[in-house]
Amino acid sequence: MLGDTPYDLQAAQKAGVPLIGLRCGGWTDPDLAGAIAIYQDPADLLAHYDTSPLAPRPENVEP
């Protein structure tokens, strides 16, 4: 899940879903503590996609 507020993080945690935090919602890293990763905004996540939690892992890629 992607979220930009601590409320998104709380909802994700209650649902048992990992959250990638985005600072563009005006919150700080400590506010988003518990996220599996934190990026400035969607463009930052896209720029770092290959090293993000969303990147395909070798075990998940078909030959």
Image (cartoon, rainbow, N blue to C red):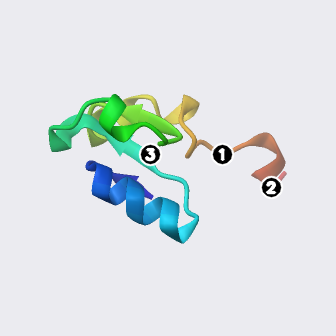
Disc 3 marks which amino acid?
A: Ile
Real-space Cα distance between discs 3 and 2?
25 Å
Q: Which quadrant of the view contains residue 32?
A: top left
Q: Residue at x 29, y 58 (%)?
A: 7
Question: SS at mark 1?
Answer: loop
Which residue is disc 2 drawn over? 62
Q: CA distance from mark 1 to mark 2?
A: 10 Å
Provide the residue designation for mark 3. 20
Select label 1 or label 3 by which is in front: 3
Residue at 30% over, 50% down: 6
Tell me where residue 27 appears, x and y as whole percent. 21, 37
The reply, left or right, for residue 55 in relation to residue 23 is right
- Read off the residue under disc 1: 56
Q: Which one is nearer the viewer's eye here, 60 or 15?
A: 15
Q: Residue furthest bottom?
A: 15
Say which amino acid is labelled 2: Glu
Q: Is residue 34 left or right of residue 45?
A: right
Label 2 packing within 10 angstroms: few (<14), some (14-19), many (20+)? few
**C-alpha distance separating marks 1 and 3:** 16 Å
